[in-house]
Amino acid sequence: NAGVTQTPKFQVLKTGQSMTLQCAQDMNHNSMYWYRQDPGMGLRLIYYSASEGTTDKGEVPNGYNVSRLNKREFSLRLESAAPSQTSVYFCASSQGLARTYEQYFGPGTRLTVT
Amino acid sequence: AQSVTQPDIHITVSEGASLELRCNYSYGATPYLFWYVQSPGQGLQLLLKYFSGDTLVQGIKGFEAEFKRSQSSFNLRKPSVHWSDAAEYFCAVKRGGSQGNLIFGKGTKLSVKP
């Protein structure tokens, strides 16, 4: 049982390049989330998917797109990377039903945009 | 609007000493509350959660937290800190409504002196 996996672990992009961060979970969870973590800012929600087939914006969606490919996989795409998107990105999943809202996190992707 | 406040950005305690990390939330109804721990370079790991019932909840690694509705607090405690507890700790509350989104505090970094 791997839990939540993310690829890649590290990435360096030049301004304007695009890339997709991959996330998969094997816990049969309904809901999946993408966060970014910046020093002193805690975790900020970028996008989430409450269930397969749905996606919604979080606090900081600008510059990102997401795809809920199936129940297991939820990808985050940067179409034209900017230095302000330098951050650590975390994917998480949860059952998302009554009394099971705890989220389980992947190990993160450290992204640097130069 | 809902929010979570962790008043202490950084705390240093001696190994073997007791620990209390503070968390205050704003939410009108009974909240769903969580504490997570993040070791350097890692993802977040769930320490404990509170949904209802007994206001003192036990978690992993010897941690406990107490829900106090009158103070809108959910403080994390440990009777005797170990060097391996050095990490960053995040308090979170479930956002109101049917979605499972969590709102995170900005975190408290714990250092442990030998």
Image (cartoon, coloured by chain):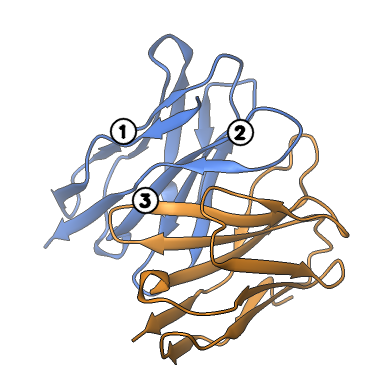
Chain colours: A orange, B blue
Provide the secondary structure element on which disc 3 rests: strand
Q: Amino acid at mark 3?
A: Tyr
Quarter location, residue B97: top right
Question: What residue did someone put label 1 on?
Answer: B22
Which of discs 2 and 3 lies nearer the camera? The answer is: 2
Q: Amino acid at mark 1?
A: Arg
Provide the secondary structure element on which disc 2 rests: loop
Q: Residues within 10 Å of mark 3 (few under 14, many from 20)?
A: many
Left or right of B108? Residue A14 is right
Q: Residue at x 42, y 76 (%)?
A: A82
Q: Residue at x 80, y 58 (%)?
A: A29
The residue positioned farthest toward the top in the image shown? B70
Left or right of B22? Residue B11 is left
Residue A20 lies, with reference to residue A89, above or below; the image says below
Confirm whether residue A6 shows in the render. yes
**For marks 1 and 3 on the same chain, the one whose residue lies earlier in the sequence:** 1
Confirm whether residue B42 shows in the render. no
